Amino acid sequence: MVLAIDKTRIFPDDKIRIILKYAFEERKNTHFTFNDEKLHTIIYKAKQVHPELFEEFNFRMNGTYPYSQLLERIIHRAKISRVIKTENPDFSEIQIRENSKNYVEQNLQPKIDSTDLSILKDLGHQLSS
Amino acid sequence: MTLLDEVNTLVNKTYNSIAVPNIIESKVVHFAKTGTHQFENYEIAIIDTPIVQRLRYISQLGLAYSVFPTARHTRFEHSLGVSIMVDKMFKSLEENHQLEHIRDRNIRKNNYIELRIAGLLHDIGHGPFSHVSEIIMSEYEPIEKEAIKEGCKPHELLAYKMLQTEKFQNFFAELNKHYKIDISPSNIANYIIGKVDNPKDDQYLADLINGQCDADKLDYIARDSNFTGVKLALGIDRLLLSLGVDKISCFDGMKRKLIVNEKGLMPLEQILIAKIMLNYSIYLHQKVRAIDYMIIPLLRKIVREKKEISGHTIKSPLDFLLIDDYDILNFASSDTETSNLCKSIKMRKIFKRSLVISPKTIDRKRTDNFQDLFLDLIKYSEKPQDMLNLNQNLIERIGENCTQFDVAIDLPKTPKLGELDQKIIKLHDGFVAVSEDIKTGWLESYLANKWKGHIFSNEKYRQRAQDKGIELFEEEFGLKFNEFATKDAKITFEYKKDSRDLSDFGIGL
């Protein structure tokens, strides 16, 4: 009997992917300017209000904005896997493919309860604005 | 029992007394590359403590010297190097009239002394093979929890805690008395984790040791490049002349921070690019990672089985603070498996690639929506326990008595690049981040394109680890590989050519 991989667990990566999906929906599925400082600050503030939902994210406060290494790695992983696509020449605009949005809806969102989902949706809106 | 209590017990048990020796005068020390430098008598007293001397036997880059033969530099010389670097940074700030806000000369002198000492002590929390034992330390819940809370690395946290122990407090009290100085171990401890009591006025002091452009980074990037032979262009002297101190509006209020003036932008960019190059050339080099993955299960076993090494019973990852690289390499256990593993590491009988895992080695025609499936795999890299479970799944598929000592899945974490987005560059009338000035998104694209994971294994299981790895990733994650996943592992070529095996050491081939 091979040790099973638990697919039901919610990873911090999953939460950020859902937020990004909502951000894209808000922007009518076009590119939007992505800024690390904005994302880190939004999640930092969200953690103050919903500590359990964002308990994995910890922030270092000695810089000019709250910085989470986990959050940085999640964005890197999304770029490594090509879930997030950036474009030349500035690489500051990002996009998610239609397939990825469907994947998030079908495979990740069902793992999250409706209250948390509405919090993530709100954060997606904040990120896109 | 808190982590501080545990560290206190450890320090008390190990060091009967950390005596303050009577050093009559300062000493001059010569270094390859960086030249000749002077250390004050009280600094020599600190350097002479067993806790700092132990760093002579902890390699800066773990066993990377098995791949880069000249990378024999240690945490000891790096620590002295950080002390020298922070000295240069502080003096540069002074010469450029950036410290005029400190009116009291004694306070300025104390800051200077404490920063140099913080450089000497910033790495005392490292265990054998530096970052390798740090992985095991991070698996220890009390360390993991506090390191996450403080936003620092486990070795920084342990150095911070060690300086808070009663023994160290007494040592510094005596040092102050004997050498007629007035330094605070708690300030030094704070600098090591990037903190100060009053960030509004003093954040720049911690920034010099653990910040966005700190002495630690400036030293290790130059040192690792120099001793591995990986050539990099670094304008550190130019950067030093561009450093400043200024009040910056931060998320949580105004802070007096270490800043870089416009003319330092180019050398700062060089340093950040160098950091990425070093990651892919050295730290994430597939052979270096392969060796790391031989040591990691060994260190876990040592803790799990409470092995006795050089007179110390290793009951928890904290006990790694008592031993060094040589203790592990020369560890002669009655347990044959452990002894053989130590010998094979020492003789560079190391894991080889079985499978290369990257978006480039996924067969995109046969894998629908590979991007999301690939992300669902690499999100497991965040926690060592998840990687252990994934590896265990592979081991069980391989069967044939395969263990954690035979095969490893490596999905490396990417380097920290947070400093790119910190607005510390003074440009025109405000402050900008490197990422705003040179649009560093291309660096992240570079990172994404260079990233590779692997399955490593010893010769015995090399082919089977490949076959079962392909099976695991397809069944559990829906990922199908292309020919480069196996071709780049060079398995067929080396398998036949390489006549060496581990049987010399009874590994059981």
Image (cartoon, coloured by chain):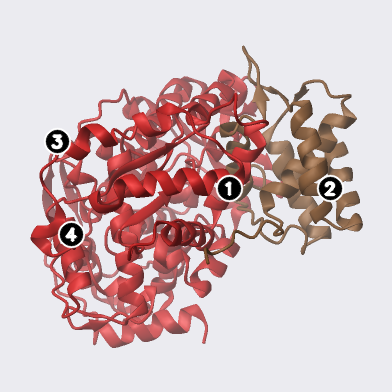
Chain colours: A brown, B red
Q: Position of residue B111 (x, y in %)?
A: 41, 55
> Where does the C terminus of chain A fall, quadrant-wise?
top right
Q: Earlier in the sequence, mark 4 or mark 1?
A: 4
Instruction: Tell me the CA gap for discs 2 and 4.
Output: 49 Å
Say which of marks 1 and 2 sits in front: 1
Q: Earlier in the sequence, mark 3 or mark 1?
A: 1
Evaluate whether label 3 is on the same chain as label 4: yes
Residue placed under numbered mark 1 in the picture: B475
- Which residue is pictured at 52% across the width and 73% down the height? B141
Q: Position of residue B442 (x, y in %)?
A: 55, 21
Q: Secondary structure at mark 4?
A: helix
Q: Which mark is residue B56?
A: 4
Q: Secondary structure at mark 1?
A: helix
Q: Position of residue A66 (x, y in %)?
A: 67, 48
Say which of marks 4 and 1 sits in front: 1
Evaluate whether label 4 is on the same chain as label 1: yes
- Which residue is pictured at 47% across the width and 28% down the height? B482
Q: Is residue B40 left or right of residue B419?
A: left
Q: Tell me the quarter of the picture where residue B249 sits.
A: top right
Q: Which mark is residue A120?
A: 2
Q: Is residue B124 left or right of residue A58?
A: left
Provide the chain ID for the residue under circle 4. Answer: B
Provide the chain ID for the residue under circle 1. Answer: B
- Which residue is pictured at 40% across the width and 25% down the height? B270
Give the amino acid at mark 3: Lys
Residue placed under numbered mark 3 in the picture: B497
Give the amino acid at mark 1: Glu
